Amino acid sequence: MTGNGKTVRLTMAQALVRHLANQFIMIDGEKVRLCGGGFAIFGHGNVTCLGEALYNHREELPVWRGQNEQSMAMAAVAYAKQKLRQRFMFATASAGPGTTNMLTAAGIAHTNRLPMLMLAGDAFQTRLPDPVLQQVEHFGDPSLSVNDAFKSVSRYWDRITHPAQIIQSLPSAINTMLDPADCGPAFLGLPQDVQGWAYDYPLSFFDERIHRIRRQSSDSDDIAAAATLLESAERPLIIAGGGVQYSRATAELTAFAEQHNIPAVETIAGRANLLFEHPLNCGPVGVTGSNSANSLAEQADVVVAIGTRLQDFTTGSWTAFAHDARFIGVNVGRHDAGKHLSQPVVGDAKLAIAQLTEALGSYRAPSAWTDLAAEERRAWNSYVDDNIRPGNRPLSYAQVIGAINELCDARDRVVAAAGGLPAEVTANWRTKSLGSVDVEFGFSCMGYEISGGWGARIAQQENEPERETIIFVGDGSYLMLNSDIYSSVLSGKKMIVIVCDNGGFAVINKLQNNTGNVSFNNLIKDCNLATEPFAVDFEAHAKAMGANAETVASIADLKEAFGRAKASDRTYVLSLQVDAFDGWTQEGHTWWETGIPAVSDRSEINAARDGADESRTRQRPGV
């Protein structure tokens, strides 16, 4: 590589990596690299050129090798979540199946508004060797490749067809990932030949740059309108979503609730916005919520939705609120701020809360309302006390969660994902410290838990290496994607994995039964089998990947084993069997709309359909 003082000749891949390595951000007064490194499985589509460039910058941009491209990209998503969207990682894959493996993880990042940079191999731009290995041919459009599938799950998408293109495209991708309103995954398709083509890049392209994340103030008229609406409220309620944490506005949220005496409830993404012990924290809301939060939601006349996209698990498919309730949507994204005819307050949550506080002046919610909220909170906490109590029923998720909650350090991070555990963690976990819970339920992606835990651990160890990353995972999710147990051992990123084995996809079996259907193809025993069903030896499996592991049979045994897991110097897997039928949290749920057959020979299905039709009458109009 030679330069003439104004330009330097590099390959496209070298220039991409060099630019990425020179991007920084200030976090709490400390300058750190914007990109925390990346995850890579190399193949013919990314090893010879991109791999060469990454090797030469391996100190600035550490590269971790997972066992599957999907899981690596999930780890990158979890890293960004742990870093509150202030930093991101890249994930790279070869052309073909390696790249398509990342599609699911892109869906997680897109749905949850999280930054991740995907660098994917692509077919030769010249097309001279076409068709190449792993190339999917489209007879009528030779410009199409599997990479085009990412357009629906990327906030920024480009295919680099000339080395000069990254001078514009790479900064645009970075700006998208840092934009509070448009944040999400960025995808760059990198044709194999273009990666190695050289260009005389301007040296200024590689100047060190310190980024900042924009904080947008809200329009004063919107603030005034929101304040006027809230001042009229007799029964106001705050719904705190994940955007509160990304804005780093948890302190402002708490102060706002206290100053105006307004009860607050949390979404799944917003768990750990408030400490459990705070008297205005009235629990999680929605389908996987609490009696306390849902009772208040039914009665609220003005709802202040802060940093939430109001998905159906939060709103009970829009049956959780009174038809005449009014909404104030505080969100950095216009799309989310105006949902259901909300009075929009478009702007950064931290600034918007301060603006709204000033506009409200001395307003405080009536004491009768907060007294009712306190009563509902006490009743729910009493229910959870009994729900997590060992011996109250067959071994349950809630008992396991309660035991770990009791013993963990306040700053330990909890990770869970789709299946039965999101509801159980959301309902039963008692937050000891802010921002310490990651329940992936935006894209509801099973398999995220262990890979996400690995990514979270990489992020966590940068700041709090003495804390633990604790993963709750069911047997179904574990069997879907577990190979990053091996990755965590190899990389020295210790996790504690709690495997709750209930014999299959038990929560979907529960949904199947609750809608009048016969158990079919969810629990292992109800599948098409050629042998008697048997439990997987998760202990032996984890040990085969280098982890420490043990099987326990009771909550008392689990507590003792958790102490050994905390003391371990490597990933520790604890496995136990929980009940698939009677072990569920029974309270706290709102209705959730699912499709039910309009015609059936089963009376149970017909009864479920009639019940759904009745529940649907409580839905707010979809405007």
Image (cartoon, rainbow, N blue to C red):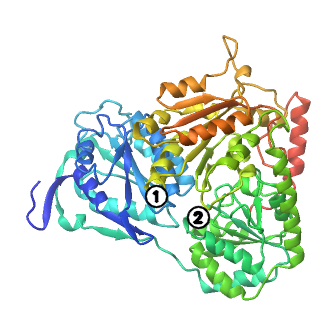
Q: Amino acid at mark 2?
A: Gln
Q: Is 597 in front, or is 198? A: 198
- Measuring from the top left, give residue 37's x and y in whole percent: 36, 51
**Label 1: which secondary element:** helix
Residue annotated with mark 2: 245
Is 172 positioned to the left or the right of 181 in the image? left
Q: Badge 1 is on which residue?
A: 463
Nearest the eye: 247 or 318: 247
Give the mark nearer the N terminus: 1 vs 2: 2
- Determine the residue positioned at 27% across, 38% down: 47
Q: Quadrant of the C terminus?
A: bottom right
- Left or right placement of residue 415 versus residue 139 in this view: right
Query: Looking at the picture, does residue 44 appear above or below residue 540?
Result: below
Q: Quadrant of residue 601?
A: top right
Q: Residue at x 25, y 38 (%)?
A: 127
**Residue 134 against residue 87 in the figure, above or below:** above
Residue depicted at 32% across the width and 52% down the height: 61
* SS at badge 2: helix
Query: x, y (%) of residue 574?
Result: 61, 33
In this rendering, position of residue 499 left or right of residue 187:
right
